[in-house]
Amino acid sequence: MRRLIMAGVAVLTCSVTPGQTPEKTLTFDAATIKPFVPQPGRGGGRLFFFGGSRGGPGSSDPGRIQYPVITLKNLLMTAYDVKDFQIYGPSWLSEERFVIEATMPPETTTQQFHIMLQNMLAERFKMTIHRETKVLPMYTMLVGKDGPKMKESPEISAEEAAKDPTPPPIPAGRGPMKMGPDGFPNLPLPSGGRGGLFMIMTPFGARLVGQLQTMQNLADRLSSILSKPVTDATALTPKFDFTLTYSMEGLNNGMMMPAPPPGESGRGPREMPDVEPPQNIFAAIQSQLCLKLEPKKGPVDLLVVDHAEKTPTEN
């Protein structure tokens, strides 16, 4: 088990082993887990578009949940309602990707759904965890000198706000995606006031597109990208639309997309876009959004993965 004992660390006495609690009977009716295999004609595995899961409690399809591409770290975030930076474990938790589909009674609550995910991780991946509290570096998000430089989201009707919040499917289609002059694909985002946070990652860099997002939404996403807590201290109350383009260099969160080897899929060497490389994320936040991140330290509750199998048990 990985030890995290050091000065300033308070170790909780409780220990959690999913699947050994009274809620063990809360399981999915059926669950299929497969390794994610990139499909030819959709970036050749060199580009990912993250928009979240489909279905589940609170959606138009409450009896089925679908994850088109997800890591175990992302699954842990949902199952235990924690952030990326709160999870300590082997690096492959954020590298190995899976396609997961599961069914459940339509009346399943969100809390019951989370317990089902916890039990699935314990049963299918033999995962065990415990909790700790540790003093760690973190950031405070503030408005910059001339900020903010973001477009305030337009007002939406009550009818639009009540629409199903389930994100759209990952764009499909034959042939390569159409790339813009800046090296990123031209992907249609949801309309009709649904909003959301969408991340596009390529070997060239990453792009975060926000629609109808609060500053707390942005701080939460930056926490995952930086693998450190980000506290919103902007005092900005409206919702905003924004685009943040940045380099993944130095971001050790297992999300960097490697460049393909020469000659992959018979296409020959892949040329990088003839544009200026993106800024690092700190410079990008300051210049593109007119916000800034100030470092500090504070206590963080952690979820430590003691053991997990890389290959799940058979479906």
Image (tube, rainbow, N blue to C red):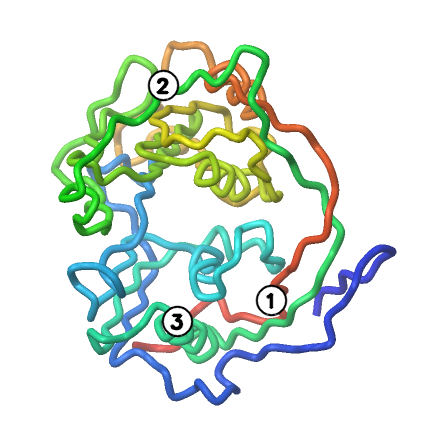
The mark nearer the N terminus, 3 or 1, is 3
The mark nearer the N terminus, 2 or 3, is 3
Residue 277 coordinates in the image, percent (x, y): 47, 15
Residue at screen point 25% across, 81% down? 29
Identify the disc placed on residue 305. Answer: 1
* The C terminus, quarter of image: bottom left
Q: Amino acid at mark 2?
A: Glu
Nearest the viewer among 172 and 188 is 188
- Mark 1, mark 2: which one is toward the viewer? 1
In the picture provided, is 236 more to the left or to the right than 51?
right
Nearest the viewer among 162 and 179 is 162
Residue 263 coordinates in the image, percent (x, y): 33, 30
* Residue wearing tag 3: 111
Q: Say few, some or many: other residues with alpha carbon within 10 Å of mark 2 (under 14 / 14 to 19 / 20 or more).
A: few
Nearest the viewer among 156 and 139 is 156
Residue at screen point 57% across, 79% down? 17
* Residue wearing tag 2: 271
- Whether residue 46 is visible here, answered yes or no, is no
Residue 68, by quadrant, is bottom left
Q: Amino acid at mark 1?
A: Val
The mark nearer the N terminus, 1 or 2, is 2
